Image (cartoon, grey):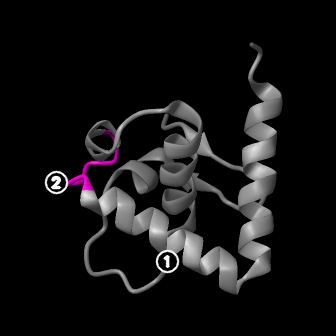
Amino acid sequence: MKSRFDPFLFSVEVDDIVMVKKGRKEKNLPRWFAIKLCQDLTGLNLQALAGIFNVQHYSAISKTVGRLNALMLEDKKVKLQYEKLRDCLMCEVKI
């Protein structure tokens, strides 16, 4: 049985987050959120994140985060979703 990523309104397979789907026109917000969260919260460099998210070049990570940042400026609901998810993850971290 596969793991599920199910925050708030997302219910997707982990593979849908870590695997690149070429040619899709829609925004893959769960993947975009996961990439940005990993960048913001783990301190991993772009090359390491590229390996995790199965992209050939680390610039794809920067481009994805840039697209999400632009979308969050345009759509406050997307920004709120991201912030809720980030805050939820931070509450789970015990330091």
User: Of the residues shown, which amino acid type is indicated by label 1?
Assistant: Lys
**Residue corresponding to mark 2:** 56
Question: Residue 32 location, x and y as percent?
Answer: 50, 61
Q: Residue at x 66, y 75 (%)?
A: 72
In-front residue for pair 12/44: 44
Question: Residue 65 location, x and y as percent?
Answer: 47, 63
**Residue corresponding to mark 1:** 27
Which quadrant holds residue 83?
bottom right
Local crowd size for mark 2, using a 10 Å CA cut-off: few (<14), some (14–19), many (≥20):
few
Question: Residue 59 location, x and y as percent?
Answer: 26, 60
User: Of the residues shown, which amino acid type is indicated by label 2?
Assistant: Gln
Name the quarter where the C terminus is drawn. top right
What is the tally of numbered marks visible in this picture? 2
Which quadrant holds residue 78?
bottom right
- By secondary structure, the bulk of the magenta-drawn segment is best described as loop
In-front residue for pair 55/25: 55
Q: Which residues are magenta?
A: 52-58
Which quadrant holds residue 47?
top left
In-front residue for pair 51/8: 51
* Residue 79 is a magenta residue: no
Q: Is residue 42 left or right of residue 77?
A: left
Q: The residue tagged with tag 1: helix, strand or loop? A: loop
